[in-house]
Structure formats: structure tokens, C-alpha cells
Image (tube, grey):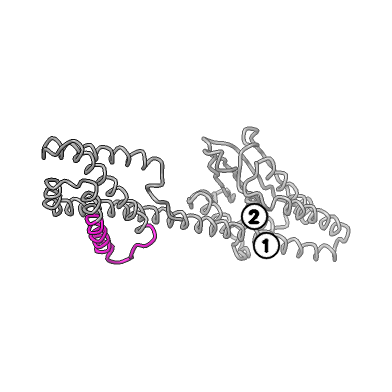
Amino acid sequence: MTTRPLSLKKVQQIAIPILLGWTALTFILFHLVLHLNLHHSATDAAVTSLMLALACVVISNILGYYQPKKQATLYMLFISLVISLVLLSLNHVSLDYLIPDESYQIFLALSLPIRFLIFFVFLSWCALANILWYKLEEQAYMQERFYQVQNLAKEAELNKLRHQLQPHFLFNSLNSVFALTIVNPKEAGTMITKLAAFLRGTLKRDDDTWVSVEEEMEYIQLYLDIEKVRFSHRLQVEITVDEASLEQKLPGTILQPVIENAIKFGLYNTSEAITISVDVSLVDHMLKVTVKNPFDPAVKTDSGTGFGLSAIRRRLYLLFADNSLIKTEATSEKVFITTISIPQHDKNYFN
């Protein structure tokens, strides 16, 4: 909805003193410079200024309802010209009726061209100011809509990524359950129970974009319980969480794909036991999560779709507009390191 500038209290507080000042200036010009009597000067100044103010209101409302996209300047000048002619006629008729003095009527007739010029310049300036007002208001409205659409698109993509991660993990788990039903039905039953608890917890927190580190680690522990059923003694996980980081915030379900990736590349192509370490700490207002897993560069690993880490990178970019918040590194000691950094500057951002 278009906001008329003259309907705003701040604009009124500026416009009223300008109107009174213009009326006073006109009165001084008529009485002290042109030597009209007091009554004639006061009547002329008051009537002319009041009509000019009403004409400005009319122009403001006309431009509020319609502004051409092209040739706006010509439209503004045309409106100002037409209203100036109408205003001049009304001004002449009104003053001629209110001041039936012959000498004043001669002055009024001689001053009509100057009055028209003043009306036209004043109303053109008023029309220009209103056009700028409405253009800026339209621009602000369009920018707000653009940001709303952009935020909705970002939220839609974030939700899509979050919901895609669950089937990605679920498919892997169901494949493992199928394998366990053949070799170890009892463990398969245990894994199904833990998987149900994990998915139930996922549904409860599905609307939480941000969670605390403490909540996320509880979620990760459920996931690791499932993986330990799958791999038994072959999988060892060392988790270190700095106490200062427990209340810090991070995007929900963001760590599970990283740990899943570490298990996949550390364990799938070896029959030996491995240890995966997870370290969570707060460093300079930045939550640091480091996941380490052994790997053998000489062994070709099935790389899969690569969806997990790419989805995390995309989520972090959508949330923070920074592509450097997830980093991977392979050391000479055959350790693969994944580091995620979550800024913690503005606590209001997470509400």
C-alpha cells in the first residue's frame, strides 16, 4: 500500500512551518514592498498560500495513484501546468470576490503572469519531490520483496538439503540391516531398534535449524550406536568436547554426514579396527569441529555420490555466505581431517 508523504507526522511537522513561513513572507512582500493595505495583504497571502497547499495535496494524491513508467518528467510537468492554470483561475475568482477594491483588482490582474509562474515552479517542485518519494518507496518495497523471496528460496534449499541427508543415511543403514539379518539376526534386531530411536529423534528436531552442541552430540551418539552395531569392535570413536562449547550453536544434523564419511573412508576397505576422533572446541568466537579418520591412499575407495560433504558445504554457504567454513586435509601420516567452523558472533542470529 502506497504511503502518502503528507499523511506522515514527520512530513507534516516540516510542511506546516514551511506553509506558515511562505504565508508570512508573502504578507511582508505585499504589505511592506508593494504597499498594499494590511487587510488586502493578509487576505491575499492567506488565500493564495492555502490554495497552494491544497494543490500540493492534490498533486501528491494524483501521483500516488498513477505514475507512468516512461516519460514521467513530461507527465509531471503536464500535471503541474494543468493544476497551476486551475489554481490561478480559482485564486483570481476568490480574491476578486473577497476584495472588491478597484485598485487591488488592477494589481491582481497585473500580477496574474507572475502568480502563474510561481504556482507552476512551486507545484513542479512538489510533483518532483512526490515522484522521488514514491519511486524510493517502490524501490524499498521491491527490495524487501526480493530479500523475502531470497530468504524463502534459501530456507527451501536448506530444508531440501536437510531432508535429503536423512534418506542418504537411511539407505546405507537399511543395506546394513539386510546384511545383518543373514549373518546375525539378533544384532539386526538391535540395530533396527536403535535406528527407530534415531529417526524418532530426527523427527522431533526436524524444525530446529539451530541446535546446541550438547544436543547435536546426543544425536551423534545415537548414530554411532547404530554404526557400532554394524561394525562391532572394528569401530572405535574418541569424542572430545570442550565444556565451553556445549551451549554454542550449530546447524542441526550437520555433523552426522561428516562422521559417516569418516567411517566410510576409514573402515570400508580394511578388516582392521580403526579409531575415529571427534574434537569440538571454541576458538576466538568460532566453533571448531574436527573429525579425523585413517585412510590408505593406495587403496581405491568407492567414492559414492559425494553428497554428504557437498551438502554440508552448500548449507554453510547458504547460512553464512562463506565457502571456506569446511576444509579437508590428508596428512602424510595417512590421516584424513575434516574441519567445520561455525561463527558464534551474533547470538540473536540463532533465535
Specify few, some or many for label 1: CA neighbours under 10 Å numbering under 14, 14-19, or 20 or more. Answer: some
Q: Main secondary structure of the magenta part?
A: helix
Q: Is residue 121 above or below residue 18?
A: below
Pointer 1 and pointer 2: residues touching (CB < 8 Å)? yes
Residue drawn 26% across the image and 42% down it? 46
The crowding category of the residue bearing disc 2, from other C-alpha atoms within 10 Å (few below 14, some 14 to 19, many at least 20), is many
Disc 2 element? helix
Task: Find residue 168 and name its label.
Answer: 1
Foreground of the two, 88 or 226: 88
Number of dots carrying numbers: 2
- Residue 73 counted in the magenta span: yes
Query: Secondary structure beneath disc 1?
Result: helix
x and y, in percent, of residue 49 in the image: 26, 45
Q: Where's residue 256, x and y in %?
A: 66, 52
Residue under pointer 2? 257
State which tag comes first along the sequence, 1 or 2.
Answer: 1
Residue 183: give x, y in percent of width and height. 85, 63
Q: Which residues are magenta?
A: 64-89
Residue 316, given in percent of the width and then of the height, sits at 54, 51
Q: Nearer the viewer, residue 38 or 175?
A: 38
Q: Choose between 196 and 98: the one closer to the eye.
A: 98
Amino acid type of the residue tagged 2 in the rendering: Pro
Residue drawn 14% across and 46% down? 104
Taking the image as shown, residue 205 lies to the left or right of residue 98, namely right
User: Which amino acid type corresponds to the residue marked 1 in the rendered image?
Assistant: His
Q: Is residue 233 left or right of residue 45?
A: right
Between 86 and 157, the one lying in front of the other is: 86
